[in-house]
Image (cartoon, grey):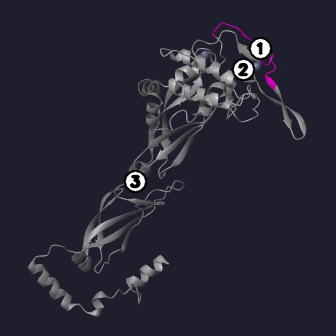
């Protein structure tokens, strides 16, 4: 049984976002695994607090949780998940800065770069062919506008951190096969700064950062393929103590197009040609990225023959040169014949000779031989 999220953070059901943020900070600091090495349950409790915060800090998730409990939140999580915070460690990094996995050991010195953010965007194949500026909306942790990131209520002092006594470092002894080893890591109360606000900023609860919905226009280059990523330098979460922002990764999704199958920069499509037209030669209309195109079907065209439309494929990402469109001919044999049509076909069949059915390009190789070779 999962514990109640409000209980985990020690807040009432009517708690404000501000209360929730403050309580999470307190609980997370108390339960941080680095502080509680003697408590084997600390890591579990720490993760539990993170999950509770993920639920209660998001208005939509919170209301789903209020109505349906943990089940409701799980059901919602099935949808878009690449948005904003990807995981608890993202949240932790965003609030407490730059140490990556909170369960990892050792930190970085100096102002750390902020975590990367990710967002997914869906475009059509036509948009992928021409390239396009698309708007993306994502949750981003940025520097708090009230305290400008130092975490102190404007006009109040920043004092020496009581936890590390201003050194910014915490020492821990670890027992190893080679004896005791002293580990030093950034203080988790002040983030290695050695200084802490006496009166935490009322807007960000002293974190120095705040989450906001960001809208950004991203240039999608022509020729992009499904599942490719675009990196927007500096579009990620704000850095720790004035460190540079992380990057934003835009995952581009290009769903299958009903007209084409993509093969690298080539496009493949199928055109239906009636059997008499294939035999006599005709013109057929083929949809391309540039609109419908009239193509010549040569007399004697066979099922599976490929007509190549040069330069009608997708542009190459690097050079911009377009691939080809390969049109596979599907010869449609007439159905539901009238007696007159049957008579004509029978007459035609009787008139056929060896030269009418032999493929001059295939040499002696039959279709069956070719299929066998393809399957080998
Ligand atoms: Zn602030
Ligand atoms: Zn400290």
Residue designated by label 2? 189
Quarter of the figure with residue 9: top right
The boundaries of the magenta stretch are 153-170
Seen from the viewer's position, the closer of residues 363 and 221 is: 363
Left or right: residue 12 compared with residue 357: right
Residue 351, horizontal then vertical, whole percent: 19, 91
Residue designated by label 3? 256
Tag 2 and tag 1, C-beta contact below 8 Å: yes
Quadrant of the rendered image holding ligand 2: top right
Residue 318, horizontal then vertical, whole percent: 54, 54
- The correct choice, above or below, for 353 with respect to 55 in the image is below
Query: What's the CA distance linking mark 2 and mark 3?
Result: 50 Å
- The correct choice, above or below, for 204 with respect to 70 in the image is above
Quarter of the figure with residue 336: bottom left
Q: Is residue 168 magenta?
A: yes
Residue designated by label 1? 162
Seen from the viewer's position, the closer of residues 19 and 235 is: 19
Q: Main secondary structure of the magenta part?
A: loop
- The correct choice, above or below, for 194 with respect to 288 in the image is above
Task: Give the residue displayed 40% in from the left and 51% down from the top.
Answer: 125
Left or right: residue 103 compared with residue 13: right
> Which one is earlier in the sequence, the residue at label 3 or at label 1?
1
Q: Is mark 2 within 8 Å of ligand 2?
A: yes
Q: Is residue 159 magenta?
A: yes
Query: What's the CA distance linking mark 3 and mark 1?
Result: 58 Å
Task: Give the residue displayed 64% in from the left and 18% down from the top.
Answer: 26
> Which one is earlier in the sequence, the residue at label 2 or at label 1?
1
- Residue closest to the far front: 1
């Amino acid at each position: 049984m999962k514990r109640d999220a409000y209980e985990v953070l020690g807040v009432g059901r009517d708690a404000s976002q501000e209360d929730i943020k403050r309580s999470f900070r307190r609980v997370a600091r108390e339960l941080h695994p680095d502080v509680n090495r003697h408590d084997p349950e600390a890591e579990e409790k720490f993760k539990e607090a993170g999950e509770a915060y993920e639920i209660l800090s998001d208005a939509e998730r919170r209301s789903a949780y209020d109505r349906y409990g943990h089940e409701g939140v799980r059901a919602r999580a099935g949808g878009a998940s690449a948005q904003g915070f990807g995981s608890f460690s993202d949240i932790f990094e965003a609030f407490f800065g730059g140490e990556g996995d909170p369960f990892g050991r050792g930190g970085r010195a100096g102002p750390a770069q902020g975590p990367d953010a990710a967002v997914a965007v869906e475009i059509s194949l036509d948009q992928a062919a021409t390239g396009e500026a698309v708007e993306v909306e994502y949750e981003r942790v940025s520097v708090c506008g009230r305290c400008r990131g130092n975490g102190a209520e404007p006009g109040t002092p920043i004092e020496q951190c009581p936890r590390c006594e201003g050194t910014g470092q915490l020492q821990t002894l670890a027992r190893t096969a080679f004896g005791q080893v002293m580990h030093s890591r950034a203080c988790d109360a002040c983030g290695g700064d050695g200084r802490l606000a006496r009166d935490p900023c009322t807007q960000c609860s002293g974190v120095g950062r705040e989450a906001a919905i960001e809208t950004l226009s991203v240039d999608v280059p022509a020729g992009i393929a499904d599942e490719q990523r675009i990196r927007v330098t500096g579009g990620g979460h704000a850095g720790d103590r004035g460190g540079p922002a992380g990057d934003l990764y835009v995952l581009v999704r290009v769903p299958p197009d009903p007209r084409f199958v993509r093969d690298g920069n080539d496009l493949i499509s199928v055109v239906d040609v009636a059997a008499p037209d294939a035999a006599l030669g005709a013109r057929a209309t083929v949809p391309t990225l540039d609109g419908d195109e009239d193509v010549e079907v040569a007399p004697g065209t066979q099922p599976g023959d490929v007509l190549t439309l040069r330069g009608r494929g997708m542009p190459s990402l690097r050079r911009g040169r377009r691939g080809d469109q390969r049109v596979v001919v599907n010869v449609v044999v007439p159905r539901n014949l009238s007696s007159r049509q049957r008579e004509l076909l029978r007459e035609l069949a009787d008139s056929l000779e060896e030269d009418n059915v032999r493929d001059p390009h295939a040499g002696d190789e039959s279709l069956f031989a070719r299929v066998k070779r393809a399957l080998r």
